[in-house]
Image (cartoon, grey):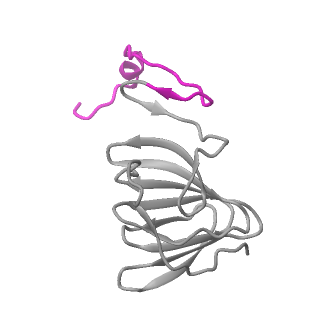
Amino acid sequence: MAGYFDQNLYFNLKVKEHKVKCNQNQRNLKFTSRKLPTDADTIAPDGSEVRLLLTLSGGSVASFRLKKGEISKAGVHKTVDEIWYILNGHGEIWRQAADNSSEITELCPDLCLTIPVGTHFQFRAYESADLSVVAVTMPPWPTDSKDEWVEVTPYWPEVTI
């Protein structure tokens, strides 16, 4: 019968399998795994803590954290787009497009948002908790560039809330 899926045949196939435990980092020729680091790897130009995760040819993933009450510096990316997913905390992000249209979006867990290349942006964490974000950067963040992110006039003054 066309399209028939034989579950018994599927589970009886001898497939080379390697299991990686959740708390292990792993890299081989085909796959890479990395647990979110406890400590920051570096500080982003905007002042947030960065925890590097993984990179492929089409993009890179990192986690950013802004401590409660902090406000990032405002900036713009020259060559990369970003997609953010809010993990924890609450705050706000200001985004301004090239045509000067702008909006302020409240940040809360499970919110996903975009920062297209050329968008001016700044974000802040409310006093209630640290703000944690996972970001996908496309193409991958150019680690050899010192001017990928350029500071712009802030929407909010850079003081704690």
Q: Residue furthest front?
A: 146
Q: Residue furthest left?
A: 2
**Horizontal placement of 112 versus 80: left or right?**
right
Where is residue 160 shown, x and y percent of the image?
72, 72
For image coordinates 43% across by 60% down, the residue present is: 82
Number of marks drawn: 0
Q: Is residue 39 left or right of residue 18?
A: right
Q: Residue at x 36, y 67 (%)?
A: 117
Q: Measuring from the top left, give residue 153's x and y in whole percent.
A: 51, 80
**Residue at coordinates 44% horizontally, 19% vertically from top-left?**
17
Picture quadrant of residue 76: bottom left
Which of the image's four quarters has the C terminus? Answer: bottom right
**Where's residue 28, x and y in %?**
41, 24
Q: Is residue 104 left or right of residue 102?
A: right
Would you place residue 129 above or below residue 25 in this image?
below
Magenta stretch: give its range: 1-27
- In the rendered image, residue 36, in percent from the top left (x then y), is placed at 60, 41
Question: Looking at the picture, does residue 17 appear above or below residue 3?
Answer: above
Residue 35 counted in the magenta span: no
Q: Nearer the viewer, residue 11 or 40?
A: 40
Up/down of 90 relative to 145, above or below? below
* Magenta portion: prevailing SS class: loop
Q: Quadrant of residue 129?
A: bottom right
Q: For the N terminus, which image quadrant?
A: top left
Asked whether 17 or 35 is in front, the reply is 35
Residue 26 higher or lower than 16, as above or below? below
